[in-house]
Amino acid sequence: MEPPDEAPLCDIYQIENATGVKLPKAYRTFLQKCGDWWGDILCPAMEPTPFGEHIICAIHSADGVYRLLDSMITPRNMITIGSGHFGSFTCLSIAGIDRGAVYALDSEFRSRWPDSRFHERFNAMADSIKEYLKMRADGKLPDKHDSYDSVFLLAEDFDSFLTRCHPPDDDDGEP
């Protein structure tokens, strides 16, 4: 992701005043240099997911993040920093023991779906989703707090998140 020729117009302080916390430094720097970004990239999760790799089509500007602060599905210690296809959002933890970590938020709440719903919706299910369902059936998924049941760790910090992102391959068959 290349920074634009001109510095973006953004009011980072607006987000910090509304949330009562200072944004993590790496993310703050990204907002100051890049603002928003549009395209198609993938980011593998660091844990099993019910959707395969996280699909990202936008990283929001400070103004876009501010407009999403009242989200009813984002955990309270997170802000929504990006969006993708198929009900996916990218969130950044701004408070707590995981401050700075980046997560994929599945707004379809597929972690709560019965297996039958996956089989009804996806004729050609990705191997990673089949593995997720098997691990769930075997009780081998990581334990999570209830508020994190539909968020999946992408990276421990924003710089690592950017490093882990990659363009889609022609043969990426994720649903």
Image: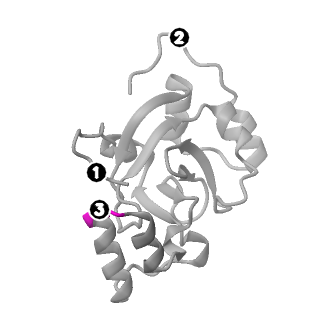
What type of secondary structure mainly makes up the magenta span? loop
- Sequence-wise, the earlier of marks 2 and 3 is 2
Q: Secondary structure under badge 2?
A: loop
- Residue at figure coordinates x 35%, y 44% from the top left: 42
- Sequence-wise, the earlier of marks 1 and 2 is 2
Q: Nearer the viewer, residue 173 or 35?
A: 173
Q: Nearer the viewer, residue 151 or 111?
A: 111
Residue range of the region highlighted in magenta in the rendering: 123-127
Tags 1 and 3 touching, CB below 8 Å: yes
Type of residue at label 1? Gly
Q: Is residue 158 magenta?
A: no
Give percent across and percent down for residue 5: 47, 10
- Sequence-wise, the earlier of marks 1 and 3 is 3
Q: Residues within 10 Å of mark 3 (few under 14, many from 20)?
A: some
Residue wearing tag 1: 173
- Residue at figure coordinates x 44%, y 70% from the top left: 120
Residue wearing tag 3: 126
Residue wearing tag 2: 6
